[in-house]
Image (cartoon, rainbow, N blue to C red):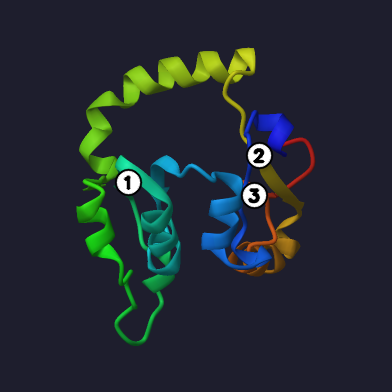
Amino acid sequence: MLDDFGYDAAVGYRRGRLGEQLAQAAPEGIDVYLDSVGGDHLQAAITAIRPGGRIALVGAISGYNATEPARGPDNLFQAAAKEVMLRGMLVSSYFTLFPEWIGQASGRLADGTLRTEETVTEGIEEAPGAFLGMMRGTNTGKALVRLATGQ
């Protein structure tokens, strides 16, 4: 997958300690992090972020189904000491830019400079299993169910 998308490195939460993986993948630190998880992922990113780095906060899935308050990163002072910018971002704040983005994205999808991945499950009868698989993270990219052949 690294070569397919032109990445230098990748980390995976199922492969062990995120902080150690980030340190190995980016020994000089990271400049930008898009956080959709929160919790230990955000904590690892704050540790790895370089001075003046930027973190976009777009979600906190680690706490979405929590029955108790979700534990947050305990190293926020590091973000202050590194003069890191943490900024929340909601897609709804950018709806006015969607027409412009659709024009750009469609061209990039057509010429291959923007790529997506998807896991397609065949048949409505397989939808419950596809949903459970998506919740367990067995899919790559978007999880889709094709209702009938030829659609």
**Marks 1, 2: nearer the viewer:** 1
- Cα distance in 3D space between marks 1 and 2: 24 Å
In the drawing, does residue 99 fall left or right of residue 19? left
Coordinates of residue 76 in the picture (x, y in percent): 25, 63
- Cα distance in 3D space between marks 3 and 2: 11 Å
Residue kind at label 3, given as amino acid type = Leu
**Is 36 placed above or below 9 here?**
below
**Is 13 placed above or below 121 here?**
below
Coordinates of residue 140 in the picture (x, y in percent): 67, 49
Q: Earlier in the sequence, mark 1 or mark 2?
A: 1
Quadrant where the N terminus sits is top right
Q: Which of the two residues, 75 or 129, is positioned nearer the viewer here?
A: 75
In the drawing, does residue 71 fall left or right of residue 109? left
Residue kind at label 2, given as amino acid type = Glu
Question: Regarding mark 2 in the picture, which secondary structure is present there?
Answer: loop
Residue at the limit of the structure toward the bottom, as seen here: 68
**Marks 1, 3: nearer the viewer:** 1
Circle 3 is placed at which residue position? 144
**Marks 3, 2: nearer the viewer:** 2
Q: Earlier in the sequence, mark 3 or mark 2?
A: 2
Coordinates of residue 101 in the picture (x, y in percent): 38, 22
Q: Earlier in the sequence, mark 1 or mark 3?
A: 1
Q: Which of the two residues, 101 or 148, is positioned nearer the viewer here?
A: 101
- Cα distance in 3D space between marks 1 and 3: 30 Å
Residue kind at label 1, given as amino acid type = Ile
Circle 2 is placed at which residue position? 117
Circle 1 is placed at which residue position? 55
Identified at 60% across, 56% down, the residue is 21
